[in-house]
């Protein structure tokens, strides 16, 4: 790694550390040496030994030596090996992938100097090994850190077994300096978070040492034990643990000491929970990637747990460190999660009691109902909240779909989950949504209304993915079913997607005719979202045709979205207004304001497809106002955003024609060589860099699009992040800066989105780290 100088600001995305990092000096030094001499380093060890924390800290320590940053990919909630490539591509902001994402990833990473952290690989070991081998072969400057309970078996893999934390030797029960032994230091640190007056002293030192030794220095086991100092003494904790060890020894063959220590700590924690807490622990294990209170109440109540009890039971499990809580934001509610190994204990208990399938069905039904609610309510003032909520629930949606597709006879339910949220897939998970719909349609051939809707949704996604043959087949069957069920809404939807496809093919008069048919159909059945979508598409088609009705359609679309206060839809309307203001009114300044406002509306929602439209349009504006290197870089940045979104809009005929005209104008002004250099520089940008450039926040000519601040924050956002670190509320920030409270809220959402955080506390910790760098 010494061949590349550290960068001033490193790209990439690593999760914030929410608790203090204790010890591991030897392990950090050893893994750093191994990573310098090898390209795949796998950290192995039992669950709870600290593999993830060590990998995160190692990546944070070395990220500045990687020109293209360090990227963390959490795999614990992913169970379908077929989605591994898509998940990795999404984490790297490369959403525009084909049906063979491994090849796309290999091509993308070929010239990148990048560190990739693949966390929790054991349940996907074969798929991780195959993909890692391909990527390492294609990308000579790529390095990978993997965490797994066992080796991946890849050629050239360096393995580092992560040991437990150091503990005093067995013949020393009076070790004078707790700081000499990492297990004691960790226990004391976590104990003080629940009992601030706790300290290791002469009276309790022998007991604490024996406790750390019995738990074999396993960090998770120590943390689970330390939390009980809120109500128990160290001696009481040790006595109860000894009882648990005896139970383990008589109940099954003796496991290795480290696994036995962890089993004892988790089982003992389970035993100390009330029967209702134990039941909830088991039932919560059905969730993937976390849950909110509403989900827990609806799925886990009943059978001895009243809905009104769930909140108090969750609070009890939080206090016992069985589940963790993330803070809410302006668009979200409190979110809870379990460590994988604790969740797995619940899964095993649930299965042993024969209750697993029933809970899976309830989980499936909850997310089927959520999809229906999304469909009925997503064109409303809650539209932004819906997008953010579903992104948070993404792992649970996957889990529900995976259950439906794996269980005999359940595939029709998958259609009812995947099809109604077509616009969620469209906004950033095109290939994944398309994959689920195609698989479900194969397994559920019955000609039902649900299949008809899924055919339409699948055809819509296929169009954006450039799958034209499949688009035609799906639409043909969908038309047959629309007539069979005499479904006017479905007829309007078919006309919409047909018109959309004609628009992309450059057959504009035919596109307008079909879209007008769709508009009339949606209005007849009072479907406002369909009406809005048709108006947007008509705006695009008439814009490309030079039809003067473009202004009428774009204004109607804006007024409809504004009347419903639907933020994402309003952003699309601003896009249509922007391109009309640019070309038909020769007002590039107003056009840029409209397009940038649309980007700002989309940023909290992470709608990269919508942002792609706007960055592309801004590059058209720049090519007519100031056809210079900056305009060329913006054209390249547009390509970077489309790559991140997964849509192929920039390759369709009407849009590519405007791109070509813009390219010719800039080349005529600056020359081929200057254009190529600037364009390629923009095309190599990250999503955040491209957006910063589009919003006019780039300050370094030809350099990074970061406005001189870490994390890609603007100066105003960094100022607000500083105020967040002081604990100010949105209202207090607005008063301090003399801005509107809603403006402050929007800035906070942008900050959380850019930094990849979910809470204000994480921002505060990040600010503190920046001050010490």
Image (tube, rainbow, N blue to C red):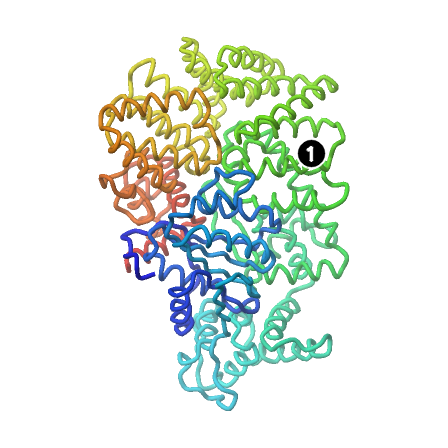
Horizontally, is 568 left or right of 522 in the view?
A: left
Residue 415, given in percent of the width and then of the height, sits at 67, 35
**Snapshot quadrant of residue 251:** bottom right
- Residue ID at (37%, 28%): 616
Quadrant of image for the N terminus: bottom left
**Snapshot quadrant of residue 93:** top left
- Residue ID at (57%, 80%): 214
Residue 438, given in percent of the width and then of the height, sits at 65, 35
Horizontally, is 745 left or right of 698 in the view?
A: right
Horizontally, is 294 left or right of 730 in the view?
A: right
- How packed mark 1 is, by other alpha carbons closer than 10 Å (few <14, some 14-19, many 20 or more), is many
Residue 604, given in percent of the width and then of the height, sits at 43, 38
Q: Is residue 612 visible?
A: yes
Q: Which residue is mark 1?
A: 441
Indicate whether 737 appears above or below 378: below
- Residue ID at (38%, 71%): 29
Indicate whether 103 appears above or below 56: above
Q: Residue furthest top?
A: 548
- Residue ID at (33%, 16%): 583
Q: Give 544 or 140, whichever is nearer the viewer.
A: 140
Horizontally, is 465 left or right of 271 in the view?
A: left
Q: Is residue 736 visible?
A: no
Label tally: 1
Indicate whether 58 appears above or below 589: below
Q: Give 603 or 7, whichever is nearer the viewer.
A: 7
Q: Give 454 or 738, whichever is nearer the viewer.
A: 454
Quadrant of image for the C terminus: bottom left
SS under mark 1: helix
Residue 649, given in percent of the width and then of the height, sits at 46, 27
């Amino acid at each position: 790694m010494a061949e590349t100088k550290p960068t001033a600001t490193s790209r990439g995305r690593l999760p914030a550390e929410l608790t203090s990092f204790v010890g591991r000096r030897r392990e950090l030094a050893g893994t750093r040496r191994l990573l310098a001499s090898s390209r795949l380093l796998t950290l192995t060890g039992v669950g709870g030994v600290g593999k993830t924390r060590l990998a995160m800290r190692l990546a944070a320590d070395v990220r500045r030596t990687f020109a293209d940053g360090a990227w963390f990919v959490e795999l614990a909630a992913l169970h379908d090996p077929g989605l591994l490539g898509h998940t990795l591509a999404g984490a790297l902001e490369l959403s525009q992938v084909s049906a063979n994402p491994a090849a796309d990833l290999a091509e993308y990473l070929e010239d990148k100097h990048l560190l990739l952290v693949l966390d929790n690989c054991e349940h996907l070991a074969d798929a991780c090994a195959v993909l890692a081998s391909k990527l390492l072969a294609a990308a000579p400057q790529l390095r990978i850190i993997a965490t797994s309970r066992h080796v991946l078996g890849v050629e050239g893999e360096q393995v580092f077994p992560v040991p437990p934390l150091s503990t005093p030797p067995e013949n020393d029960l009076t070790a004078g300096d707790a700081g000499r032994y990492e297990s004691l230091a960790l226990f004391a640190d976590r104990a003080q978070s629940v009992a601030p007056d706790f300290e290791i002293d002469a009276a309790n030192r022998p007991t604490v040492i024996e406790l750390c030794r019995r738990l074999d220095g396993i960090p998770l086991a120590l943390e689970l034990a330390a939390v009980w100092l809120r109500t128990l003494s160290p001696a009481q904790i040790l006595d109860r643990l000894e009882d648990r060890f005896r139970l383990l020894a008589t109940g099954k063959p003796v496991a290795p000491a480290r696994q036995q220590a962890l089993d004892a700590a988790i089982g003992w924690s389970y035993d100390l929970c009330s029967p209702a807490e134990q039941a909830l622990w088991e039932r919560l294990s059905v969730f993937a990637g976390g849950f909110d209170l509403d989900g827990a109440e609806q799925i886990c109540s009943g059978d001895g747990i009243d809905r009104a009890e769930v909140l108090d039971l969750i609070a009890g499990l939080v206090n016992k460190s069985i589940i963790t809580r993330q803070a809410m934001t302006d668009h979200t509610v409190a979110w809870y999660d379990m460590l994988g190994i604790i969740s797995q204990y619940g899964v095993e208990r649930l299965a042993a009691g024969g209750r697993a399938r029933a809970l899976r069905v309830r989980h499936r039904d909850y997310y089927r109902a959520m999809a229906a609610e999304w469909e009925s309510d997503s064109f409303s003032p809650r539209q932004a909240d819906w997008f953010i909520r579903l992104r948070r629930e993404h792992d649970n949606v996957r889990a529900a779909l995976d259950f439906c597709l794996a269980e005999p006879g359940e595939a029709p339910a998958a259609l009812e989950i995947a099809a109604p949220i077509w616009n969620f897939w469209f906004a950033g998970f095109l290939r994944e949504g398309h994959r689920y719909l195609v698989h479900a349609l194969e397994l559920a051939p019955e000609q039902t209304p649900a299949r008809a809707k899924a055919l339409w949704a699948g055809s819509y996604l296929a169009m954006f993915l450039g799958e034209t043959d499949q688009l035609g087949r799906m639409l043909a069957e969908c038309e047959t079913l629309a007539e069979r069920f005499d479904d006017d809404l479905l007829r309007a939807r078919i006309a919409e997607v047909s018109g959309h496809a004609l628009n992309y093919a450059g057959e504009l008069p035919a596109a307008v005719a079909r879209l007008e048919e769709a508009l009339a159909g949606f209005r007849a059945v009072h479907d406002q979202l369909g009406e809005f979508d048709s108006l947007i598409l008509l705006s695009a088609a008439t814009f490309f045709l030079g039809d003067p009705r473009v202004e009428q359609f774009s204004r109607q679309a804006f007024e409809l979205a504004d009347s419903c206060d639907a933020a994402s839809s309003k952003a699309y309307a601003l896009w249509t207004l922007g391109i009309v203001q640019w070309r038909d009114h020769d007002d590039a300044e107003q056009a840029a304001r409209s397009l940038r406002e649309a980007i700002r509306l989309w940023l909290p929602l992470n709608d990269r497809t919508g942002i792609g439209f706007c960055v592309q349009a801004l590059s058209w504006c720049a090519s007519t106002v100031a056809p210079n290197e900056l305009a060329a870089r913006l054209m390249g940045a547009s390509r970077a955003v489309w790559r991140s979104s997964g849509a192929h809009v920039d390759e369709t005929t009407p849009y590519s024609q405007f791109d070509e005209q813009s390219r010719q104008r800039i080349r005529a002004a600056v020359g081929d060589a200057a254009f190529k250099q600037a364009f390629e520089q923009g095309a190599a940008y990250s999503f955040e860099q491209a957006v910063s450039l589009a919003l006019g926040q780039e300050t370094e000519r030809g350099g990074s699009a970061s406005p001189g601040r870490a994390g890609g924050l603007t100066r105003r956002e960094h100022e607000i992040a500083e105020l967040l670190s002081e604990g100010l509320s949105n209202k207090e920030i607005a008063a301090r800066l003399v801005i509107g409270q809603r403006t402050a809220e929007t800035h906070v959402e942008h900050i959380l989105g850019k930094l990849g955080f979910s809470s204000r506390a994480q921002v505060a910790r990040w600010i503190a780290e920046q001050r010490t760098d």
